[in-house]
Image (cartoon, grey):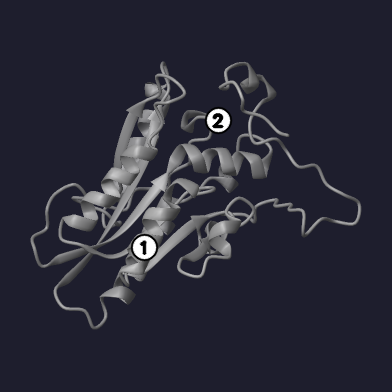
Amino acid sequence: MSVSEIAPEMPDADRSGAGAEALTSSGPDVRRVLLVWDAPNLDMGLGAILGGRPTAAYRPRFDALGRWLLARTAELSVGTKGRVEAEATVFTNIAPGTADVVRPWVEALRNVGFAVFAKPKIDEDSDVDADMLAHIATRARDGGLAGIMVASADGQAFREPLEAIAARGIPAQVLGFREHASWAVTSDTLEFVDLEDIPGVFREPLPRVSLDSLPDEGAWLQPFRPLSALLTSRPGQGVA
Protein backbone atom coordinates (compact mmCIF):
# COMPACT_ATOMS: atom_id res chain seq x y z
CA MET A 1 0.00 0.00 0.00
CA SER A 2 1.47 3.32 -1.05
CA VAL A 3 1.39 6.58 0.85
CA SER A 4 -0.98 7.98 -1.75
CA GLU A 5 -3.52 5.33 -0.83
CA ILE A 6 -3.44 6.01 2.88
CA ALA A 7 -2.15 9.60 3.12
CA PRO A 8 -2.75 10.98 6.60
CA GLU A 9 -5.17 13.85 6.95
CA MET A 10 -3.41 16.98 8.12
CA PRO A 11 -4.95 19.52 10.51
CA ASP A 12 -4.60 23.27 10.20
CA ALA A 13 -0.90 24.03 9.94
CA ASP A 14 1.05 24.99 13.02
CA ARG A 15 4.25 26.75 11.96
CA SER A 16 5.79 26.30 15.40
CA GLY A 17 5.93 22.51 14.95
CA ALA A 18 8.99 20.27 15.24
CA GLY A 19 11.75 20.01 12.71
CA ALA A 20 11.81 23.48 11.11
CA GLU A 21 15.03 24.08 9.17
CA ALA A 22 15.61 20.34 9.47
CA LEU A 23 18.29 19.98 6.83
CA THR A 24 20.47 22.92 7.80
CA SER A 25 23.42 22.85 10.16
CA SER A 26 22.77 24.43 13.55
CA GLY A 27 26.37 24.75 14.70
CA PRO A 28 28.82 22.59 16.63
CA ASP A 29 27.18 23.14 20.02
CA VAL A 30 23.80 21.82 18.96
CA ARG A 31 22.65 18.23 19.32
CA ARG A 32 19.45 16.86 17.86
CA VAL A 33 16.58 14.72 18.99
CA LEU A 34 15.81 13.07 15.67
CA LEU A 35 12.49 11.57 14.61
CA VAL A 36 12.48 9.46 11.45
CA TRP A 37 9.02 8.49 10.13
CA ASP A 38 9.00 5.54 7.69
CA ALA A 39 5.82 6.42 5.76
CA PRO A 40 5.59 3.42 3.38
CA ASN A 41 6.13 0.87 6.14
CA LEU A 42 3.76 2.59 8.57
CA ASP A 43 1.11 2.88 5.87
CA MET A 44 1.29 -0.87 5.36
CA GLY A 45 1.14 -1.56 9.09
CA LEU A 46 -1.81 0.75 9.68
CA GLY A 47 -3.63 -0.69 6.68
CA ALA A 48 -3.15 -4.18 8.07
CA ILE A 49 -4.67 -3.17 11.42
CA LEU A 50 -7.63 -1.46 9.76
CA GLY A 51 -8.11 -3.94 6.95
CA GLY A 52 -8.07 -1.17 4.34
CA ARG A 53 -7.74 2.53 3.78
CA PRO A 54 -8.32 4.56 6.96
CA THR A 55 -10.99 7.15 7.47
CA ALA A 56 -10.09 10.56 8.90
CA ALA A 57 -10.44 9.22 12.46
CA TYR A 58 -7.61 6.72 11.88
CA ARG A 59 -5.11 8.92 10.08
CA PRO A 60 -2.08 10.05 12.12
CA ARG A 61 -2.08 13.68 13.25
CA PHE A 62 1.41 15.04 12.76
CA ASP A 63 0.79 18.18 14.80
CA ALA A 64 0.22 15.94 17.85
CA LEU A 65 3.31 13.94 16.98
CA GLY A 66 5.35 17.14 16.66
CA ARG A 67 4.23 18.40 20.06
CA TRP A 68 5.14 15.05 21.61
CA LEU A 69 8.59 15.27 20.01
CA LEU A 70 9.09 18.79 21.35
CA ALA A 71 8.12 17.64 24.85
CA ARG A 72 10.51 14.71 24.59
CA THR A 73 13.27 17.07 23.44
CA ALA A 74 12.65 19.33 26.44
CA GLU A 75 13.02 16.31 28.73
CA LEU A 76 16.30 15.24 27.15
CA SER A 77 17.71 18.76 27.24
CA VAL A 78 17.46 19.07 31.02
CA GLY A 79 20.93 19.15 32.53
CA THR A 80 22.76 18.94 29.21
CA LYS A 81 25.40 21.35 27.96
CA GLY A 82 24.75 23.25 24.75
CA ARG A 83 21.53 23.49 22.83
CA VAL A 84 19.27 20.56 22.00
CA GLU A 85 16.86 20.83 19.07
CA ALA A 86 14.11 18.61 17.68
CA GLU A 87 14.22 17.47 14.08
CA ALA A 88 11.22 15.70 12.57
CA THR A 89 11.57 13.95 9.22
CA VAL A 90 9.25 11.90 7.01
CA PHE A 91 10.60 9.54 4.34
CA THR A 92 8.21 8.48 1.59
CA ASN A 93 7.95 7.01 -1.88
CA ILE A 94 6.01 8.68 -4.68
CA ALA A 95 4.44 6.21 -7.09
CA PRO A 96 4.19 7.21 -10.77
CA GLY A 97 1.15 9.39 -11.45
CA THR A 98 0.42 10.14 -7.77
CA ALA A 99 2.33 13.41 -7.31
CA ASP A 100 -0.80 15.59 -7.48
CA VAL A 101 -2.55 13.40 -4.92
CA VAL A 102 0.36 13.33 -2.47
CA ARG A 103 1.44 16.98 -2.88
CA PRO A 104 -1.10 18.48 -0.39
CA TRP A 105 -0.01 15.99 2.27
CA VAL A 106 3.69 16.72 1.71
CA GLU A 107 3.11 20.49 1.78
CA ALA A 108 1.04 20.22 4.95
CA LEU A 109 3.81 18.21 6.63
CA ARG A 110 6.38 20.83 5.70
CA ASN A 111 4.10 23.59 6.97
CA VAL A 112 3.79 21.86 10.35
CA GLY A 113 7.60 21.71 10.57
CA PHE A 114 8.53 18.28 9.24
CA ALA A 115 11.23 17.83 6.61
CA VAL A 116 10.17 15.39 3.88
CA PHE A 117 12.46 13.14 1.85
CA ALA A 118 10.51 11.99 -1.21
CA LYS A 119 11.79 9.34 -3.62
CA PRO A 120 10.20 8.00 -6.83
CA LYS A 121 8.79 4.49 -6.51
CA ILE A 122 10.33 3.04 -9.66
CA ASP A 123 10.52 -0.63 -8.74
CA GLU A 124 10.44 -3.00 -5.77
CA ASP A 125 13.97 -2.02 -4.76
CA SER A 126 13.43 1.76 -4.71
CA ASP A 127 12.36 1.96 -1.08
CA VAL A 128 13.68 4.54 1.39
CA ASP A 129 15.30 2.30 4.02
CA ALA A 130 18.85 3.07 2.88
CA ASP A 131 18.08 6.81 2.79
CA MET A 132 16.75 6.75 6.35
CA LEU A 133 19.77 4.84 7.60
CA ALA A 134 22.11 7.27 5.82
CA HIS A 135 20.37 10.26 7.40
CA ILE A 136 20.61 8.72 10.86
CA ALA A 137 24.34 8.09 10.32
CA THR A 138 24.84 11.66 9.11
CA ARG A 139 23.09 13.16 12.11
CA ALA A 140 25.05 10.95 14.48
CA ARG A 141 28.26 12.44 13.03
CA ASP A 142 27.08 16.00 12.37
CA GLY A 143 26.89 17.54 15.81
CA GLY A 144 25.69 14.37 17.43
CA LEU A 145 22.38 13.05 18.72
CA ALA A 146 20.74 13.74 22.06
CA GLY A 147 18.09 11.17 21.26
CA ILE A 148 16.59 9.28 18.35
CA MET A 149 13.23 7.73 17.56
CA VAL A 150 12.32 5.74 14.47
CA ALA A 151 8.65 5.31 13.58
CA SER A 152 8.16 2.16 11.51
CA ALA A 153 5.59 -0.62 11.60
CA ASP A 154 8.16 -3.38 12.13
CA GLY A 155 11.46 -1.48 12.22
CA GLN A 156 13.68 -4.51 11.66
CA ALA A 157 15.93 -2.59 9.25
CA PHE A 158 16.81 -0.18 12.07
CA ARG A 159 17.47 -2.68 14.84
CA GLU A 160 21.27 -2.88 14.68
CA PRO A 161 21.90 0.86 14.08
CA LEU A 162 19.56 1.82 16.92
CA GLU A 163 21.12 -0.70 19.29
CA ALA A 164 24.58 0.67 18.41
CA ILE A 165 23.39 4.21 19.16
CA ALA A 166 21.79 3.10 22.43
CA ALA A 167 25.05 1.39 23.41
CA ARG A 168 26.67 4.85 23.36
CA GLY A 169 24.24 6.03 26.01
CA ILE A 170 21.93 7.89 23.62
CA PRO A 171 18.20 7.32 24.28
CA ALA A 172 16.75 5.35 21.36
CA GLN A 173 13.07 4.65 20.82
CA VAL A 174 11.06 2.67 18.30
CA LEU A 175 7.59 4.04 17.51
CA GLY A 176 5.10 1.71 15.89
CA PHE A 177 2.42 -0.88 16.53
CA ARG A 178 3.08 -3.55 19.14
CA GLU A 179 1.56 -6.23 16.89
CA HIS A 180 4.30 -5.75 14.31
CA ALA A 181 7.38 -4.94 16.41
CA SER A 182 7.66 -7.61 19.09
CA TRP A 183 11.47 -7.43 18.88
CA ALA A 184 11.34 -3.79 20.00
CA VAL A 185 8.68 -4.38 22.64
CA THR A 186 10.92 -6.97 24.34
CA SER A 187 14.26 -5.19 23.74
CA ASP A 188 16.56 -4.61 26.70
CA THR A 189 18.29 -1.62 25.09
CA LEU A 190 15.55 0.16 23.13
CA GLU A 191 12.35 1.77 24.36
CA PHE A 192 9.17 0.96 22.45
CA VAL A 193 6.35 3.50 22.17
CA ASP A 194 3.07 2.43 20.63
CA LEU A 195 1.85 5.21 18.34
CA GLU A 196 -1.62 4.91 19.79
CA ASP A 197 -0.22 5.79 23.23
CA ILE A 198 0.96 9.22 22.03
CA PRO A 199 -1.81 11.68 22.95
CA GLY A 200 -3.80 12.96 20.00
CA VAL A 201 -2.06 11.02 17.22
CA PHE A 202 -5.32 9.17 16.47
CA ARG A 203 -8.76 10.66 16.95
CA GLU A 204 -10.37 7.29 17.66
CA PRO A 205 -9.04 4.02 19.13
CA LEU A 206 -7.71 1.69 16.46
CA PRO A 207 -9.72 -1.53 15.94
CA ARG A 208 -6.80 -3.73 16.96
CA VAL A 209 -6.87 -7.51 17.15
CA SER A 210 -3.88 -9.69 18.05
CA LEU A 211 -3.42 -13.39 18.71
CA ASP A 212 -2.98 -12.80 22.44
CA SER A 213 -6.12 -10.67 22.80
CA LEU A 214 -8.70 -12.46 20.66
CA PRO A 215 -12.41 -12.03 21.49
CA ASP A 216 -14.27 -15.18 22.45
CA GLU A 217 -16.15 -15.18 19.16
CA GLY A 218 -12.93 -14.99 17.13
CA ALA A 219 -11.79 -12.30 14.73
CA TRP A 220 -10.53 -11.84 11.19
CA LEU A 221 -6.83 -10.96 10.74
CA GLN A 222 -6.44 -9.04 7.51
CA PRO A 223 -3.53 -9.72 5.10
CA PHE A 224 -0.55 -7.38 5.19
CA ARG A 225 -0.59 -7.09 1.40
CA PRO A 226 -2.80 -8.27 -1.48
CA LEU A 227 -2.46 -11.85 -2.74
CA SER A 228 -1.64 -10.48 -6.19
CA ALA A 229 1.70 -9.28 -4.80
CA LEU A 230 2.88 -12.89 -5.20
CA LEU A 231 2.98 -12.30 -8.95
CA THR A 232 5.72 -9.68 -8.57
CA SER A 233 7.60 -11.02 -5.55
CA ARG A 234 11.09 -12.45 -5.79
CA PRO A 235 11.46 -16.23 -6.29
CA GLY A 236 11.90 -18.06 -3.03
CA GLN A 237 9.71 -15.71 -0.99
CA GLY A 238 6.88 -17.46 0.73
CA VAL A 239 5.58 -19.23 3.80
CA ALA A 240 6.87 -22.66 4.72
- Is label 1 in a helix, a strand or a loop? helix
- Residue 136 makes an appearance in the image: yes
Tell which circle, 1 or 2, labels the residue nearer the N-terminal end: 2
Indicate left or right for 198 with 99 as reference.
right
Q: Identify the residue at horizontal 50%, vertical 40% (top origin).
A: 41
What is the x, y in percent for residue 143? 15, 60
Q: Quadrant of the N terminus?
A: top right
Q: Look at the picture and state if 6 lies above or below 183.
A: above
Q: Identify the residue at horizontal 8%, vertical 60% (top origin).
A: 27
Q: Residue furthest right?
A: 217
Identify the residue position indicated by label 2 in the image: 1
Labels 1 & 2 near each other (Cβ < 8 A):
no
- Tell me the CA gap for discs 1 and 2: 27 Å
Q: Look at the picture and state if 238 lies above or below 188.
A: above
**Res 65 → quadrant:** bottom left
Q: Amino acid at mark 1?
A: Leu
Q: Nearer the viewer, mark 1 or mark 2?
A: 2
- Is label 2 in a helix, a strand or a loop? loop
